[in-house]
Amino acid sequence: MTEVLDGVPSNADPGQIARRAFDVALTSLRQREQAKLAELHELGETMSIGSLQRLRHAYETKGVLGLVDRRLIR
């Protein structure tokens, strides 16, 4: 999620520059979401744009806890 929102992944080294597809100065949020979906598809993962947006919104509002399956917390 951080790569889609900020341009660099959460495990990036300090000062690491965003990849072109995720550069916030060059791409819109929608373009970064589509780039992430394409990347996931190449890895064999399938996800709809709606699912990615739902997860992004949950991350923005609740942080990492927003990404956790709530059924596991009960």
Image (cartoon, helix red, strand yellow):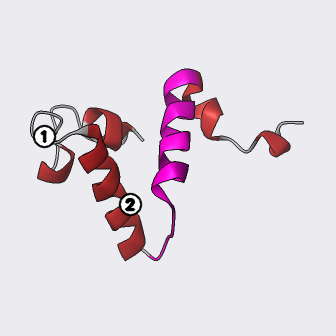
Main SS of the magenta segment?
helix
Q: Quarter of the image for the N terminus: give it.
A: top left
Secondary structure at badge 2 equals helix
Q: Secondary structure at mark 1?
A: loop
In the drawing, does residue 74 fall left or right of residue 21?
right
Q: Is residue 6 left or right of residue 23?
A: right
The residue shown at (41%, 65%) is 40
Residue 30, quarter of picture: top left
Q: Position of residue 6 (x, y in %)?
A: 28, 33
- The kind of residue tagged 2 is Leu
Magenta run includes residue 60: yes
Residue under label 2, please give it: 37
Q: Residues within 10 Å of mark 2 (few under 14, many from 20)?
A: some
Judge left or right: residue 54 versus residue 44: right
Q: Residue at x 90, y 36 (%)?
A: 74
Instruction: List x then y, in percent, for residue 52.
Output: 49, 49
Instruction: Give neighbour class at mark 1: few <14, some 14-19, many 20+ (Cα, 10 Å).
Output: few
Which amino acid, by three-letter code, is at mark 1?
Ile
Which one is nearer the viewer's eye here, 25 or 64?
25
Query: What x and y, as percent, mark residue 54?
Result: 55, 41
Of 29 and 60, the residue lying toward us: 29
How far, Cα to Cα, is label 2 from label 1?
20 Å
Asked whether, in this view, residue 63 is left or right of residue 13, the answer is: right
Q: Nearer the viewer, residue 26 or 71?
A: 26
- Residue extending furthest right? 74
Q: Which residue is mark 1?
A: 17
Residue beneath the point at 51% across and 50% down? 50
Q: Which residues are magenta?
A: 44-61
Residue 8, compared with residue 47, is above or below; it is above
Tag 1 or tag 2, which sits nearer the N-term? Answer: 1
